[in-house]
C-alpha cells in the first residue's frame, strides 16, 4: 500500500509518495495536507 501526500506552498504544489503514514509531522506542520491512499493494481496483488 502506498500513500500520496500533497500540499501547496504559495503557488507551487508538492507531493511525496510514502509506503506508510509514518512521516515527519514537523516537516508538514501548518500545511493543508491531502492524503490519498493508492491501491495496488490488480496484477500486483498476491493471493494465497
Image (tube, grey):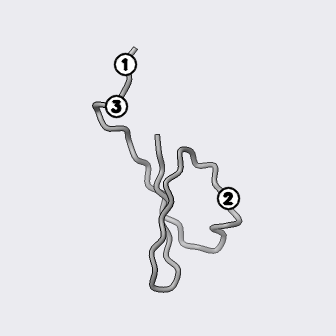
Q: Are there few (<14), some (14-19), or many (20+) residues within 10 Å of tag 3?
A: few
- The secondary structure type at the circle numbered 2 is loop
Of badges 3 and 2, nearer the viewer stands 3
Q: Position of residue 35 (x, y in %)?
A: 48, 58
Q: Outermost residue toward the right?
A: 26
Q: Is residue 2 above or below residue 35?
A: above
CA distance separating discs 1 and 2: 33 Å
Q: Are marks 3 and 1 in contact (CB under 8 Å)?
A: no
Of badges 3 and 1, nearer the viewer stands 3
Q: Which mark is residue 24?
A: 2
Q: Earlier in the sequence, mark 1 or mark 2?
A: 2
- The secondary structure type at the circle numbered 1 is loop
Q: Residue at x 71, y 65 (%)?
A: 26
Q: Position of residue 24 (x, y in %)?
A: 67, 58
Q: Outermost residue toward the top?
A: 48
The answer to whether 26 appears left or right of 20 in the picture is right
Q: Position of residue 17 (x, y in %)?
A: 49, 54
Q: Which residue is mark 3?
A: 44
Q: Is residue 36 above or below residue 48?
A: below
Q: Are there few (<14), some (14-19), or many (20+) residues within 10 Å of tag 2?
A: few
CA distance separating discs 3 and 1: 10 Å
- The secondary structure type at the circle numbered 3 is helix
Q: Which mark is residue 4?
A: none
Q: Which residue is mark 1?
A: 47
CA distance separating discs 3 and 2: 28 Å
Q: Outermost residue toward the left?
A: 43
Amino acid at each position: 500500500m502506498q500513500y500520496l501526500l500533497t500540499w501547496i506552498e504559495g503557488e507551487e504544489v508538492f507531493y511525496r509518495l510514502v509506503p506508510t503514514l509514518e512521516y515527519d509531522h514537523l516537516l508538514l506542520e501548518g500545511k493543508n495536507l491531502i492524503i490519498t491512499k493508492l491501491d495496488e493494481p490488480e496484477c500486483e496483488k498476491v493471493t494465497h
